[in-house]
Image (cartoon, helix red, strand yellow):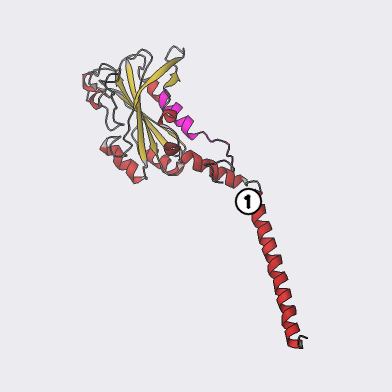
């Protein structure tokens, strides 16, 4: 038979075993509940913001820069701008003039994505640039320091601005930096969207002695706004789907 001390130790061991079992059960139950509970509003918001900030990497380039983008000329009818190409280089320093590159770098630029469009008549060429930042606050600070829009005034190319991206064999083939006549900037979430535009014949901005009537480059701001709005639009998170982190 067991002695008194042995029986006491046996009782202690049984009690401790029960305690550990109960603790383990509670821990497992808590973990299961944590994994299966609905996300809080804060977690949903954080997941949505994270997904938006990753779009410049996660989305195909053709989704960021669709083949066609609608715009409205001054008479109000709807037309479509057509993409002539997408630039493979995403470097922050190579996508813009050096004066802007310094501002973007200061605020943590991650990439500059560029694509070029022509208007429906293929007379106006617009390069659209998406500048990606870590968060909306960095993007807003950079946006506030960038130069505003500028049209031709006879003094030379519009500068500093997004660099033009011509594509050989297309209507944008002659659109070089020297042909830039207008620039715009917009912002959506953690992205700043820049545009630079000119004429398809490649005429230098310095050759333009006066502003053309009718604001021929108004298409640029519309394209930039559409791209910015699409990139910044928050989707409803599905925390159980791959790619979401709630």
Q: Which residues are magenta?
A: 222-238
Magenta-span inclusion, residue 56:
no
Residue sitting at 72 percent across and 78 percent down?
12
Residue 130: where, in percent of width, then height? 38, 33
Residue 243 image offset from top left, x and y in percent: 52, 42
Residue drawn 59% across and 40% down? 238
The magenta stretch spans residue 232 = yes
228 and 24: which is toward the camera: 24
Asked whether 70 or 159 is in front, the reply is 70
Q: Nearer the viewer, residue 17 or 76?
A: 17
> Is 103 left or right of 56, judged from the image as shown?
left
Q: Predominant secondary structure in magenta?
A: helix
**Quadrant of res 212:** top left
Q: Is residue 169 left or right of residue 128?
A: left
Most foreground residue, 92 or 198: 92
Q: Which residue is mark 1?
A: 35
Q: Is residue 96 at all visible to an observer of this figure?
A: yes
Q: Is residue 127 visible?
A: no
- Mark 1, Cα crowd under 10 Å, few <14 / some 14-19 / many 20+, is few
């Amino acid at each position: 038979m067991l002695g008194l001390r042995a029986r006491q130790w046996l009782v202690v061991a049984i009690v401790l075993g029960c305690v550990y079992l109960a603790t383990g059960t509670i821990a497992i139950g808590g973990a299961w509940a944590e994994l299966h509970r609905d996300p809080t509003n804060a977690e949903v918001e954080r997941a949505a913001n994270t997904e938006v900030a990753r779009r410049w990497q996660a989305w195909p380039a053709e989704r960021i820069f669709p083949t066609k983008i609608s715009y409205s000329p001054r008479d109000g009818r709807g037309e479509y701008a057509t993409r002539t190409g997408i630039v493979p280089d995403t470097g922050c320093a190579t996508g813009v003039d050096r004066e802007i590159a310094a501002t973007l770098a200061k605020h943590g630029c991650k990439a500059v994505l560029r694509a070029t469009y022509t208007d429906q008549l293929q007379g106006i060429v617009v390069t659209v640039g998406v500048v990606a930042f870590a968060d909306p606050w960095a993007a807003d600070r950079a946006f506030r320091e960038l130069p505003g829009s500028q049209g031709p005034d006879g003094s030379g190319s519009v500068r500093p601005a997004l660099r033009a991206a011509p594509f050989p064999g297309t209507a944008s083939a002659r659109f070089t930096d020297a042909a830039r006549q207008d620039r715009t900037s917009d912002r959506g979430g953690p992205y700043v969207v820049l545009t630079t535009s000119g004429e398809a014949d490649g005429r230098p901005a310095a050759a333009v002695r006066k502003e053309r009537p009718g604001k021929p480059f108004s298409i640029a701001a519309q394209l930039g706004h559409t791209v910015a709005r699409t990139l910044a639009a928050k989707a409803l998170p599905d925390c159980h789907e791959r790619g979401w982190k709630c």
